[in-house]
Image: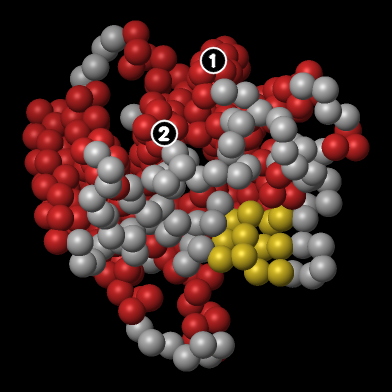
Amino acid sequence: MRGLVMIIMALDHTRDLMHLTSLSQSPTDLATTTPMLFFTRWITHLCAPTFVFLSGVSAWLSFKGKNDLAASRRFLLTRGLWLIILEFTLVNFGVWFDIHFSVLLFDVIATIGVGFIVLGLSLKASARTLGIAGLIIIFCHNLLPLIPFAEGSAIKGILSPLFALGAFPLGPHTTFLMAYPPIPWLGIMLAGFGAGQFFGWPAARRQRIFVKLGLGALALFVLIRAVNIYGDPFPWAAQKNGLYSFMSFINITKYPPSLIFCLLTLGITFLILALFEGAKNKFAAICAVYGKVPLFYFLVHWYIIHPIMFAMVFLQGFKSSDLLFGFNFGRPKEGSGVSLGIIYLVWIAVVIILYPICKWYGHFKETHKDQWWLRYL
């Protein structure tokens, strides 16, 4: 499952860096998007919540495997700190290719790092307690914007970066972008930690619970979304035709992940987990190659896609003096980019390139378990 979402994730980042309209148009803006562009973006919504949820599951499995609270806490704290450092160094450079680091992006790797630190400090609590805490966050964090904090108040200034998307200037040439506010994503990780026990059940029982959880989450999504009062900051509305009305219904908010975003994406995740249960086919084996080395894949894929983007720009006749870094990824202000069909071809090529690299690294990790540092990559 983790490998599947890693494959899909590369599509989103290829589109971000190389699509004709990625710098000027939101693919989920129903006023300007096309169905193909909308669903190209929409399918990738599965990636982050699945990855964060399964990070919580992995933490639980590691904790139970060690059966040593002190060792597990130490690993989660150091792992979390390492992920935060990695985010603001190798990951940020891979995203922006900007030697000045004019945009400091707090993204999924950093928010997982914060989640691991919180988990490490909370291991004395039961998995059930932490799972319930996660569900409370998922179901209730959308209430925060309804609280009438005074504009400019200290408490709003403290809470906003923890709960909401925001850009904060750190100087005349540097911006801190909070893309993955840690509290809502922490809810998903804690829910994953609480659900970790399911992965120790017999396969048939685990498959049944995943189907029930998946269908239940999707049913709750439909109910809450249909009521159109709570669960997402942007209500859905009837559009020019049935397809666009459906797109509006499933046009969910990721930044931060709304309640209905979590219900829809994690509901689908549970159903795919049930489908993958016991799978012994070639596709599952290919996915597993990527899923065994997710952090390595995440790092390397940026350093493959971004050079391809620069090759595209130069082949289209631009010069190095035309490149704009920061939020432009190094692309010129306008005129560069390729069609959506080409994006899919580049995405497939990137995934194919990554396969032997990830297979080699997975084998290297498996045969060098004595090297402790491999646990951090």
Type of amino acid at the residue the image marks with label 2: Thr
Q: In the displayed structure, does residue 204 sit left or right of residue 188?
A: left
Pointer 2: what residue?
34
| Disc 2 secondary structure class | loop
Q: Residue at coordinates 71% horizontally, 69% vertically from top-left?
A: 169
Q: Which mark is residue 276?
A: none
The tag earlier along the polypeptide, 2 or 1, is: 2
Mark 2 touches mark 1? (CB < 8 Å): no
* Residue 19 visible in rendering: yes
Q: In the displayed structure, does residue 258 sit left or right of residue 228?
A: right
* Residue 69 visible in rendering: no
Instruction: Tell me where residue 175 appears, x and y as whole percent.
Output: 71, 62
Residue at the extreme right of the image, as rendered:
321
Q: In the displayed structure, does residue 278 sit left or right of residue 110?
A: left
Type of amino acid at the residue the image marks with label 1: Leu
Pointer 1: what residue?
345
Instruction: Tell me where residue 358 appears, x and y as whole percent.
Output: 55, 20
Instruction: Tell me where residue 360 appears, x and y as whole percent.
Output: 58, 15
Name the mark nearer the viewer: 2 or 1: 2
Instruction: Tell me where residue 71 appears, x and y as whole percent.
Output: 47, 53
Q: Residue at coordinates 56% horizontally, 18% vertically from top-left?
A: 342
Q: Residue at coordinates 79% horizontally, 43% vertically from top-left?
A: 324
Query: In the figure, 103 relative to 142: above or below?
Result: above
Quadrant of the image occupied by residue 14 = top right
